[in-house]
Image (spheres, grey):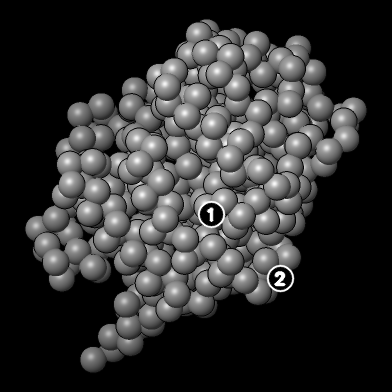
Amino acid sequence: MIGISKLYCGAVEASDPLRYGRNSKKLPSHLLQFSYDKKPVVVWNITQRCNLKCVHCYAKAVSEKVDNELTTKQGKALIDDLADFGAPVLLFSGGEPLIREDLLELITYANKKGLRTVISTNGTLITEKMAKRFKEVNLSYVGVSLDGIGATNDKFRGVKGAFDAALNGIRFCRDNGIKVGLRFTINKRNYKEIPAIFELMETEEIPRICFYHLVYAGRGTSLINEDLSHEETRKVLDLIMDKTKELFQKGKPKEVLTVDNHADGPYIYLRLKKEDPKRAEEVLELLKMNEGNSSGRGIGCVSWDGEVYADQFWRHYSFGNVKERPFSKIWTDLSNELMAKLKDKKPYLKGRCAKCKWLSICGGNFRVRAEAATGDLWAPDPACYLTDEEIGLNNSH
């Protein structure tokens, strides 16, 4: 994650994470990306079932019930292990997590074990009663996926009325004191609606949004030709920065982040270097703490059937199953060649990635996207939009 509000608008200073020692268990949620130990935030896809039919679903969610989900007992064993391992956050996802009947029981159990709990949902099943229950079980955050306004979102979701239902769910969370935010996947079909999304955040008093760059995984592979061009991506980043700054200047600050393209970090730095050199140097220190992409290190995924992945998009390669071995053992088993390489990717990267001067703050960007586009796990990420000059390849003079 790259915090636009944190970095560009100064919502976080370089000294802020240092005050907590940069230990992931001690850091507040908004500073977790700057932890030094990189204990994994774990995404647990608790079910493959979903009530919608999203065209870009990385999990290839289905409507019918599947019989291979972790049981409640197995889920609690997973939670025990994650708590002992020191994972700071457990994110319940799907499919649609609200379909699973023991969701609240699992959230309650995880909280008692000291894990911060969040959910990623399409929002359509959140009733006022459910929002009140979220508050009662001390859920930290609800992220609701919206990929446009009205009909645009509904086309992505494959169900008419999904936008209105999700907006109602957002309002129920907000009105019951649950921190709620948006998740927006950027592509050619919807990027022109970003200004309207910022307007929605302002009018509905939504405090947070994550803009996800498109990852070619699951059903999202069908959108590979609808990813933004490099020039479009640069314009979108500038727009997001401008809109975030406008809200700060209005006295209505929002937490705005981009996800899954760590070229955003150097891009923010290079823009700030022109606008505010002093702030730019502070941002560079924060980016060094962030370290860029953390798949297989600072983020991991457990599937509904117990398989362990490097992140929620990298579902074609499992490191093992929590039904057979604890997550902590799988995650630290460096006899697995890929797991060992993901702990330090730099020596294995190829092409412009290997020579990039921003490698230590980008981390080689998204390996699963490089593999999907080229067939080579260690090839340059095709979504990197920085020029050769910007990454230091044309500076021989």
Describe residue 69's horizontal placement relative to residue 366 as left or right.
right
Residue situated in front as seen by the camera: 170 or 86: 170
- In the picture, measured across the screen, residue 378 lies left or right of residue 276, that is right
Give the secondary structure at mark 1. loop
Which numbered disc, 1 or 2, marks the residue closer to the eye?
1
Q: Which residue lies furthest to the bottom in this view?
A: 397
Q: Can residue 379 be seen in this view?
A: yes
Residue 327 appears left or right of 110: right
Q: Is residue 168 above or below residue 52?
A: above
Helix, strand, or loop for circle 2? loop
Coordinates of residue 33 in the picture (x, y in percent):
38, 40
Q: Position of residue 210 (x, y in %)?
A: 45, 47
Q: Is residue 173 above or below residue 237?
A: above
Where residue 303 sits in the image (x, y, percent)? 73, 35
Q: Residues within 10 Å of mark 1 (few under 14, many from 20)?
A: many
Image point 16% across, 49% down: which residue?
A: 249
Q: Which residue is drawn at 39% across and 37% down?
A: 204
- Location of residue 62 (image quadrant): top right
* Residue holding disc 1: 148
**Foreground residue, 58 or 242?**
242
Say what amino acid the circle numbered 1 marks: Gly
Q: Is residue 133 above or below residue 291?
A: above
Query: What residue sits 73% from the left and 42% below the top?
Result: 52
Residue at 65% over, 28% down: 125
Type of amino acid under label 2:
Gly
Seen from the viewer's position, the closer of residues 132 and 28 is 132
User: Relative to 188, is 4 above or below?
Assistant: above
Q: Residue 293 carries which label?
A: none
Give left or right: position of 259 versus 395.
Answer: right
Identify residue for label 2. Answer: 375
Can you give x and y, in whole percent of width and height, for residue 162 in the image? 65, 42
Check disc 2: other Cα within 10 Å, few if <14, some if 14-19, many if 20+.
few
